[in-house]
Image (cartoon, grey):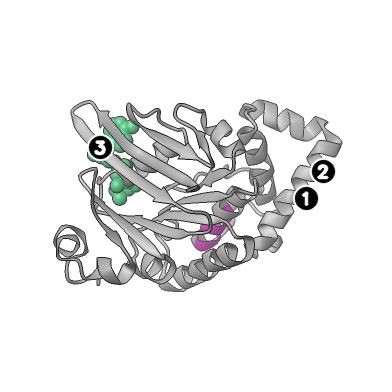
């Protein structure tokens, strides 16, 4: 049974056909990539799969259950976590608090409830804090626990996002452009961390990424979309040489 099975996903925004009949499957413990030009519909796929948008047409089955229409926190509770294309951290709270509070908001609490619970519920909170510290350690961020995200270098902020996604012990991790804005040293560092989580924890990872170095070195297979439809699917080697992919997306300089 596939871990994730998407069939016939279709999405319109007003006059824009953002996705047309998008289908995709992934098995447990795969590391796969979703690539394509700006505006191709990549983030829209993640937004629908993770429950942020309700899709107009199509079906999504995750871990044996149909998840169409489930709210994001319900999808998270089933074992799917995601990061965002633009970093979404609370800048005036410590890194540790960012991760603890994320746990509560995924449990369906509002932000204020989460803050209050953190203050009130000693024992439950202790378990959440332990898990948050473990996630920080997984990303080599233990020393940053008490820092404010805005005071950290950008590469570390990206890793805090990863730690936050990992704190719920996901089976499937969706990464939306984890290397966006990173310099080449930070990209190397990110690649190492992603490979380590994948190898060590047996989770499945589906990532959107424009930096070809990242997808080519990490992913076992790639799906290319263009104008909301699948253009090609296959190994990085196959995709790299695919004439239509080169025309529509890769061009000469990126290969
Ligand atoms: N909430 C929305 N309302 C209206 N249009 C949207 C919305 N979200 C996405 N779109 C449109 O749908 C299309 C696909 O957008 P999407 O963000 O999925 O692209 P993308 O492949 O992630 O691009 P990028 O590489 O730039 O992040 C675009 O034309 C975008 O403007
Ligand atoms: Mg996007």
Q: Disc 3 designates what residue?
A: 18
Distance between the alpha carbons at the discs numbered 1 and 2: 6 Å
Residue 44 seen anywhere in this rendered image of the structure: yes
Could you tell me residue 241's position as x and y percent?
21, 71
Q: For the residue labelled by badge 1, is the local secondary structure a helix, a strand or a loop? A: helix
The answer to whether marks 1 and 2 mark residues whose Cβ atoms lie closer than 8 Å is yes
| Lower sequence index among marks 2 and 3 | 3
Q: Is mark 1 within 8 Å of ligand 2?
A: no
Q: Horizontally, is 32 left or right of 163 in the view?
A: left
Q: Is residue 247 above or below residue 109?
A: below
**N-term-proximal mark, 3 vs 1:** 3
- Left or right: 127, with 163 as reference point: right
- Which residue is identified by label 1? 130
Dot 2, how many residues are within 10 Å of its Cα: few (below 14), some (14-19), or many (20+)?
few
Question: Which residue sits at x=35%, y=39%?
Answer: 7
Looking at mark 3, is its residue's CB closer than 8 Å to ligand 1? yes
**Dot 3 crowding, Cα within 10 Å, few <14, some 14–19, many 20+:** many
The secondary structure type at the circle numbered 2 is: helix
Image quadrant assignment for residue 248:
bottom left
Please say if 213 is above or below 74: below
Q: Which mark is residue 126?
A: 2
Say whether mark 2 is within 8 Å of ligand 2.
Answer: no
Image point (75%, 43%), residue name? 128
Residue located at (59% from left, 38% from top): 78
**Start-end of magenta stretch:** 155-160
Is residue 180 visible in this depiction of the protein?
A: no
Between 240 and 23, the residue placed more toward the observer is 23
| Image x and y of residue 94, in percent | 67, 48
Q: Residue at x 32, y 68 (%)?
A: 236
Mark 3 and 1 residues: CB-CB less than 8 Å, in contact?
no
């Amino acid at each position: 049974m596939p871990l994730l099975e998407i069939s016939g996903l279709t999405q319109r925004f007003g006059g824009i056909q953002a996705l047309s009949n998008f289908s995709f499957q992934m098995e447990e413990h795969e590391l796969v990539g979703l690539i394509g030009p700006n505006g191709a519909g990549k983030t829209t796929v993640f937004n629908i799969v993770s429950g942020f948008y309700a899709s107009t047409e199509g079906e999504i089955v995750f871990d044996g259950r149909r998840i169409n229409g489930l709210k994001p926190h319900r999808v998270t509770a089933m074992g799917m976590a995601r990061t965002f294309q633009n970093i979404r951290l609370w800048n005036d709270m410590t890194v540790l608090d960012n991760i603890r509070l994320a746990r509560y908001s995924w449990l369906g609490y509002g932000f204020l409830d989460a803050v209050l619970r953190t203050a009130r519920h000693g024992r439950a909170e202790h378990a959440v804090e332990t898990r948050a510290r473990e996630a920080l350690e997984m990303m080599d961020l233990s020393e940053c626990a008490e820092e404010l995200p805005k005071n950290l270098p950008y590469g570390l902020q990206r890793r805090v996002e990863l730690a936050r996604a990992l704190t719920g012990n996901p089976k499937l991790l969706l990464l939306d452009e984890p290397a966006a804005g990173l310099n080449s040293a930070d990209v190397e560092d990110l690649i190492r961390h992603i490979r380590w989580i994948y190898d060590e924890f047996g989770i499945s990872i589906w990532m959107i990424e424009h930096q070809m170095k990242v997808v080519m070195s990490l992913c076992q297979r790639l799906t290319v979309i263009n104008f909301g439809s699948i253009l090609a699917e296959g190994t990085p080697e196959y995709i790299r040489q695919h004439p239509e992919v080169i025309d529509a997306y890769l061009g000469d300089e990126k290969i």
